[in-house]
Amino acid sequence: MHLILYILPEIFLALAIMFLLMLGVFTKKSFNLVYLLTILSLIFAIALVLNQPEEAYRYFGIIKIFNESYIIDKLSSFMKVLTLLFCMFVLLLSNDYVKNSNIDKIEYPIIILASTLGMILMISSFDLIVFYLGLELQSLCLYILASFRRNDERSTEAGLKYFVLSALATGILLYGCSLIYGFTGSTNFEVISEKLTESNMGAVFGIVFIIVGLAFKVSAVPFHMWTPDVYEGSPTSVTSFFALIPKIAAITVFIRFLYVPFINVISQWQTIIVFLSIASMILGAVAAIGQNNIKRLVAYSSIGHMGYALAGLVTGTNEGIHSTIIYLTIYLVMNLGIFGCIFMMKRENVFYENINDLSGLSKNHPMLAFSFLIILFSLAGIPPLAGFFAKFYIFMAVIEIKMYSLAVIGLVTTVVSAFYYLRIIKVIYFDRPKKAFDKNYDWGLKSSLILSSVLILIYFIYPTILTDIVTSIVIY
Amino acid sequence: MNFPILSAIIFIPLIGAFFIFITRGSQKNVEENSKYVAIFSSLTNFLLGLFLWYSFDSSTSNFQFVEEKYWMGGFINFKLGIDGISILFILLTTFIAPICIFSGIHSIKFKIKEFFIAILVMETLMLGVFCSLDLVIFYLFFEGGLIPMFLIIGIWGGPKRVYSAFKFFLFTLLGSVLMLVAIISIYWITGTTDLIKLLDTRIVQEYQYLLWLAFFSSFAVKLPMWPVHTWLPDAHVEAPTAGSVILAAILLKMAGYGFMRFSIGLFPVASDYFTSLIFTLSIIAIIYTSLVALMQDDMKKLIAYSSVAHMGFVTIGIFSLTKQGLEGSIIQMISHGLISAALFLCVGVVYDRYHSRMISSYGGLVNIMPKYAFVFMIFTLAALGLPGTSGFVGEFLVLVGVFQVNILVAVLASLGVILVAAYMLWLYRRVIFGRVASSEIKKMTDLDKTEIYIFASLVFLTLFFGFYPEPLLNTADISINNLIDKYQTDINFHLSQKNN
């Protein structure tokens, strides 16, 4: 019985999904109510995660339940809170957009909630099968979300493209899982870790396939093809969800796979991750230069950022994991901000996506322009903003193991990527003003944007707030 | 000394900027208020700088007013402190900042509030560079300066401002990222980024060369040295007057300061090894950019190239690694800070009135603006190093210093002095003397009161330090001695190891 207590957040979310579905179906015009209740249930789920039973932390903060297939430790708790929190912020942020762009169906928040549940299962999984189930739950929801504006060609295209490619990647991943199972005889991460050796060629193939599948989920080069199209085609509210939430789960699973079952064969996967990381950093920096659509630009920039996050994982050390987690957290805050700005690009209830539409923003909206400025410089990694510290921790970890070439390439791509962030700043600050945007902002949008800008701006005053939490996370 | 005076001096401009940021009301009110806040906070800072100099103990080479605050998990601490070298740059910065603000009041016509915020934030970051005693903190301030400077050039600049702003930003950023790699490497090699501790550790010689090059890549771009100086003329030309002043007077000095503090202090063996590289690049910079300056028809561009040449003297002086050379470099940097600031202000004066920077647009100004002609003359002569101006003291000491180590370099550098005279005098003749170029120039008014005050202060300091550089030299003396002593012992240690 007491095992149930550990998965209360998951159970609560599942019940909430069913309840909200009923509520939505049986009451008329219930979108606003369902939307609000979704946000509230996310908050309640955060409270449940934070309020784990005492015993959960008795054994070095780790507890494994259900035949050791489900793990609750500091990593999973931190990532779950991150997922739920940012999911809540994304919903707050996109409320106005969802209402104004004709996708205000009750299914929308419910599917997001279901997808979040899938991610939380992924984060806590300690077994190939549980992991796969969580992955499927979240991906199926994401396909629907991408094509949510079903009358729109681009949205349908995005959904279909994402579905086909993602199904392929998931297939490869599943094949990898079965190879691992075949060669080690277990689906449990701990057991796999003991059985895996470098001479086990079949299992090494399995590792490669699993990494390919995961790389697809974090959209690392060369498995990034879907990202720009899906980001551009999906409704912006869905794009903001895509750019933030699935990355958390995917990175967590990446950490879990590389550092628990595969840690003994680090020499096999290290070069792969180095390649993924360098390729993503370079492509993310170079390909974004030519973009005029801000959503496509964010897509490429997120590819680049995932490259940096992966660079932390290359190291095989605890510092590496910490730097990746810090990077991910700061990335989430920055992207929350940039999507907040994108949601504000609205004239007479029509949303704009082109960078040129921002022209001269600083004249009509000085505060919005200032937020944009902070967030963009932070994305470019200029000190003293938060984005610099994110990169700083990554390169601390990378240089510790003396991978100088990776560090230098990473920093040089920072300079290249600075160019396109500067381009947006140039449009905002140096160009002639256009017609002003609407000023009737939603309070949720406004407060999320202010929160993210302020966090980015003042992070340097007290950086230990984040690092203290993250450094307590230990992987065994 | 418990009062955190260095933190105060760093953050007063930032607090001023914050107050300007939150001012609300009608546009006229906001502009008036932000103007007063900016003047007030920058002048307070200048007085604080003077007080700092007054209470500074120039009989010790230790770092003074040291502050340390727990930051970033304890492995990197927020550590501030100054010695005889940094205090001079702090004084220069606190002196130049109010001048920029006064100049901004005069010539900036739109987004005035934002302009003052940018200048004050810039002042905070520049002061931070000179005060920081931790490599990471130093990097933070050093790089952070890119943001306000990018905006100053991009928003208030001339017609090609976007190109210049981008070039400035990307050039300096590319140079600096390698320094970041080096800083992190130093942390993993020695276990600390605390400068005081690092100065007492000998970094293993094999690492020194690469680390030195990484720091060099950053400082060489910022200084700028040939061949990575190309961003400077563009940035200077397009920046508003106040921006050019900050760039020339302080931003470039950060690199010279960095060479002294980090390259020589932390990597003496490598500094010794790469001296010839520095000498070659500096000589090319002096002669080549002087020749280029002769060809310019844009006044600001000409002064920008002359900056590159002058900074060539600075690097020669630093890497002569003699007492006179280092003293000369410091004086040269301070005096260049005053003179180039004044020259850019001079260009700004005529630009505000006639909106042209072309030399050919002007002529015969001596008849129309006699006071202006007088001021311009003093700074022209100071720039070419006439005895009695601070420019002379710097160049002379540098040449004395370098004569002791390398006569060829000294001779070639002296050749540069002649070239400087050539283009500066030619510039002066074409702008001030000759026939009045057009009837519209006749309508130009002479210097007004604010401008006279600004120039008077600059003229006074240039001449004062020209005749009596003792205050500067006294302050820096012990620190320079200490730097050279440490360098010598490290080199000797290295040589004795080699012989064994």
Image (cartoon, rainbow, N blue to C red):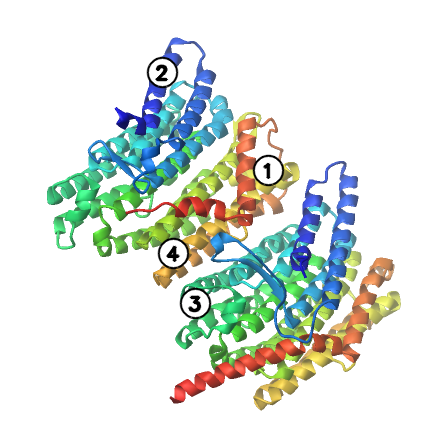
Q: Do residues under tags 1 and 2 come within 8 Å of each other at their CB atoms?
A: no
Give the residue type that dot 4 points to.
Ala
The residue to which callout 2 is attached is: A19
Q: Which mark is residue B190?
A: 3
- The answer to whether residue B461 is above or below residue A326 is below
Question: Cα distance, mark 3 to mark 1?
Answer: 44 Å
Judging depth in this view, the residue of B31 and A92 nearest the camera is A92
Label 4: chain letter:
A
Q: Quadrant of the N terminus of chain A?
A: top left
1 vs 4, front mark: 4
Question: Cα distance, mark 1 to mark 2?
Answer: 38 Å
Label 2: chain letter:
A
Q: Helix, strand or loop at disc 1?
A: helix
Mark 2 burial class by Cα count in 10 Å: few <14, some 14-19, many 20+: some
Q: Is residue A257 left or right of residue B229?
A: left
- The picture quadrant where one finds residue A344 is top right
Question: Cα distance, mark 4 to mark 2?
Answer: 45 Å
Question: Cα distance, mark 1 to mark 4?
Answer: 35 Å
User: Do tags 3 and 2 sit on the same chain?
Assistant: no
Residue at the spot 53% in from the left edge and 83% down from the top edge: B488
Mark 4 burial class by Cα count in 10 Å: few <14, some 14-19, many 20+: many
Q: Helix, strand or loop at disc 4?
A: helix
Label 3: chain letter:
B
**Mark 1 vs mark 4: which is more N-terminal?**
1
